[in-house]
Structures are given as structure tokens and as C-alpha cells.
Image (cartoon, grey):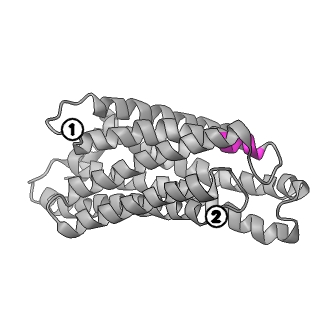
Amino acid sequence: MLTAVVAIVIFINFVLAGVVGARLLRMPSEERLSPERLLGIYLVVGLLVGGLLVAVAYGAWSTQGEAESTGALTGLHAAGQVLMSVGYLCVIGFTWRTFHRGAAWARWCAVALSVLLLVSLGGRAFFEGFAISIDPGPYHWLAYVVRIAGLGWMGAMAFHYWRQMKKRLALGLADPMVVNRFALWGLFALGTILSALSEPIARVVYHLTAGDQLASADAITKVGGPIIEMALLLTSISGTVTVVALFLTFFPTKAYARWVAGEAH
């Protein structure tokens, strides 16, 4: 039952990301890599296509009871990881160009995060490999940290601008829905981070529980199963947050718009 619920939430998240991303990519822009297009690429290429490939690869691997994926499954995972990295490069660029376009420190921060993400890809391609494993190497975790940092930066800036715009809203100098969208986008970033955190939590719990039988098929099946269920529960909750936040950001209902307007007065 839980698996079905999570599958539905994830499916809706993928579809919604594709719809919103396509909408952003169709928007006219004088810049080739405008913030709107960067965000659209993240949603379509990184979240929809890349995320879907990684989800399928992990789902297939979890049913095999093996310590490491092989063959076509590893290739599928590699393609997904590359596309997800493209998406997160766009997240970093979007945050820089949207919130700190004229700040030198932000430009160098974006460059540093982008370089680290590319280093992680190179390390996996030439040294570590892209096989899904119960004990991934440092390049896997480097990419993971950079992605969390990119999302954290984006979410922090969205919440910061929300707080700043609330002051203008109190003076009647801002549109309530625009102000609310900053909060929603911060929630989207937060929900995505929480979904990502389910992986290291599950891995830590598995290591502590499996002990010396870490790579055995028996431990993967008997110990890993309940831990995967726990990770799915966390993902279903955080995934619901991202779905609601993303939907209301771009497709606010009339009832929600009335509520936002009412809260502003």
C-alpha cells in the first residue's frame, strides 16, 4: 500500500515538473539561458527525465537483492545521474542569476559548486563507476552534497525574499500572490531536500542494522526491505509537499488566491 502511495506521489511530481518546465521553456526570452529557461531545464531534464531514470534504476536494483547493479541497469543509472547533474547545474545558475546577478561572491560560489559537480561526474566516470551500490564511494557523496547545497541556496534565498517582500506587502507595495510564490518556492526546495535526505538516512540505518552481513543477499532482502519502507514513507511526505508547492506556485486555484489575498489584509 505504501509503495503504491509513494509511486503515485512520485509520478505526479514527475508529470507536474514536466508540465511546468515545458511551460517555462516556451516563455519568450532575450537571453539564451535566462532564469526561466534554467529553471525549465532543471524541471524537464533534471527532475523529470533524470529523476525518472534514477528512480527506475533504483527500483529495479532493490528487487534484485544484489550488493551492486550491473549491465544495463548501471547504464540507466549513469544516464540518469548525468541528466540530474545538468539539472542541478541549472539550479545553481538559476539561483545566482535570479537573486545575486551582480554579486561577485555569488558568481564564484556558483562556479565552485558547478566545478565540484563536474568533478564528481568525472570521478564516477573514470574511477568510481556508476553502479548502484549499498556502499557508494566519495564521488557519489560529493555530487549529493553539491545538489543539497544548490537546493539549500535556492530555498534559503526564496524564504529570504519572502520575508523581505512581506514588509513591502504590509505597506501595500507588493502583490500578495507574488510574495506567496517566494514562500511556495522555498517549500518546494525544502521538500526536495527532505526527499533527498531519505537516501543517506536509509543507508546509515542499514549499515547500523546489517553489521558484518552488509553485502549479503539475506541482509539486503530482510534488513533492507523494512528500511526501504521507511525511506518510502519519508519520501511520500516530502514528495507531497513538493507537489503541492509546485502546483500552487504555477497553477494557484481561485480558492487559494482568495485565501492569500485575505491573509494579506
Looking at the rendered structure, the kind of residue marked 1 is Arg
* Residue found at x 29% / y 34%: 24
* Residue found at x 75% / y 52%: 68
Q: In this view, does 139 lie to the left or right of 210?
A: left
Magenta stretch, main secondary structure class: helix
Disc with the residue nearer the chain's start (1 vs 2): 1
Query: What count of labels does the image hold?
Result: 2
* Residue found at x 34% / y 58%: 154
Which portion, as a residue range, is magenta?
57-62
The reply to whether residue 32 is visible in this rendering is yes
Q: How far apart in space, not on screen, are marks 1 and 2 (Cα)?
A: 36 Å
Magenta stretch: includes residue 58: yes
Mark 2 crowdedness (10 Å alpha carbons): few <14, some 14-19, many ≥20: some
Return the mark for residue 32: 1
Looking at the rendered structure, the kind of residue marked 2 is Gly
Mark 1 crowdedness (10 Å alpha carbons): few <14, some 14-19, many ≥20: few
* Label 1 residue SS: loop
Whole-percent x, y for residue 60 in the image = 73, 39
Residue closest to the eye, 263 or 138? 138
Whole-percent x, y for residue 260 in the image = 27, 46
- Pointer 2 residue: 137
Whole-percent x, y for residue 263 in the image = 26, 52
Q: Quadrant of residue 26?
A: top left
Return the mark for residue 159: none
Residue closest to the eye, 135 or 35? 135
